[in-house]
Image (tube, grey):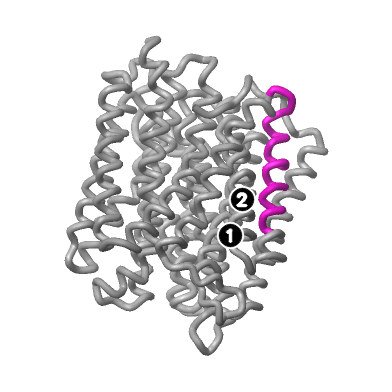
Amino acid sequence: MREPGRRLLPSLVYAALSTAIVSSLGMLLVPTISRELVVPIGTAQWMLTVNLLVGAVATPVMGRLSDGPHKKALLIGALVVILAGSVIAATATDFTVFLVGRALQGLTYGIVPVTIALARRYLPKEQTARGISSLSVTVATGIGIGYPLTGIIAGVADYEWAFWFAALFVVTAIVVVLVVVPRGPDREAPRTGFDVPGALLLAAGLGSLLLAVSEGPTWGWGSPTTIGCFVAAAVLLALWVVVELRVAHPLINLRVLRNPEVLLANATGFGLGTAMYMGLSIGSLIAQAPAETGYGIALPVFWAGFVMFPLSVGSFLANRLTHVITRRIRMTTLLPLGAAVVTASMILLLIAHDELWEILAGMFLFGVGIGSTYAAMPGLIARSVAIAELGSAVSFNQVLRTVGGSFGSAISGAVLAAHMATDGHPTGSGIEFALALGAAGCAAVLIALVADHLRGRGGVAGPGPISSV
């Protein structure tokens, strides 16, 4: 076991990072897909929506399955499906087929809980906390790498090459997992039945919720379709809670989620996930908007993707720094510290976003704050739940981040749609209002975390240092 232990963590990080890069493909390519596949911009946005919907459904399912004995087979199977989706998207000649490929790529959102479950099972005990935190921040790191990659490809070649590169990343990840991850089923894992009713209700409820949030700006927030989706989501998720509290082996053990540390991590994941996608969407928009708007930097798509690269650098460095910080402070103290940095970055973007260096500085600070909080959350969950429940508990945290991100994108989209200039671009006041909302949301999360910490619910000191590979 010594040899797999030495190579396992970097291999799992590579697999998670590869799929995180794949999941970041899309936002910069919406105008290109609209033009090349001859569909309206509103229709092209479905390449983001369908990916998010599948991801929200797949994440809790894959998280629960990763608690079982077939962790490696689950990871390989998911990577193969993502590979197929990348190839389909790269070769599609009409938008419907392209959407099928993007839907299959949605399984990327469920990869992190599976890799965390493998790390918890096979890594030496002294490396477990480090491994979990490293895997958790791959989402932010992957976005920071995926955006520049997308911008380069969109700037110098056809969009299909972005998906061929995605396929190449996934192929190498499959090879690494096949070679390094221990063979055979996990004989120590419990063999329990799968909660099919819970999975179906959660999938339908989350699908309805995210569909309403994602398409609300297009359909109209007061339209019967949007309201109907919200009502359906409320009913389905209420039924899901009832089912989960009654079955012997639920998809997600809701009783575990009442643990103060798990609840704290989940609330933080949702709140900062909302703020993160608000900051990303506004920052990307400012970078590409024409100078005539009064706020735009007018970067070509080739360079626009690099605006997100400091996010990746910041999250990576933050994960490294936690190795030192958590020797002296509690992991729950790391949450308000990270939230404070995220709040500072949003305030910086609010008051200073006219120059490129200001956007880059804001994104770097965003990466530092998100990286530190994302590194702490799985560690809090891992020490608060039994190993048999780790996959489902961590995956639910990932779902809340995804749902929060969807809300953040929808909120910023609705604000900007209500503040459009005659040239088709948002007004400067709309940009500032959206950034102000993001800063206010970050401040609210920070205040709640500080209040919780002062009430003495910070828990005990962490189980050792956390660092990156």
Q: In the rendered picture of this protein, how many numbered marks are placed on residues?
A: 2
Instruction: State whether residue 263 is above or below residue 154.
Output: above
Instruction: Report the Cα–Cα distance between label 2 and label 1.
Output: 8 Å
Mark 2 / mark 1, whichever is N-terminal: 1
The question of residue 344 being in magenta is answered with: yes
Residue type at mark 2 is Phe
* Left or right for 93, reference 422: left
* Left or right for 446, reference 80: right
Which label sits on residue 366? 2
**Picture coordinates of residue 201, whole percent (x, y):** 40, 51
Viewer-nearest residue: 311 or 102: 311
Q: Residue at x 64, y 49 (%)?
A: 365
Residue type at mark 1 is Gly
Q: Name the residue under label 1.
A: 279
| SS category of the residue bearing label 2 | helix
Quarter of the image with the N terminus is top left
* Left or right for 88, reference 303: left
Q: Residues within 10 Å of mark 2 (few under 14, many from 20)?
A: many
Q: What stretch is highlighted in magenta?
A: 327-346
Q: Which residue is drawn at 22% across and 66% down?
A: 96
The question of residue 13 being in magenta is answered with: no
Instruction: State whether residue 294 is above or below residue 297.
Output: below
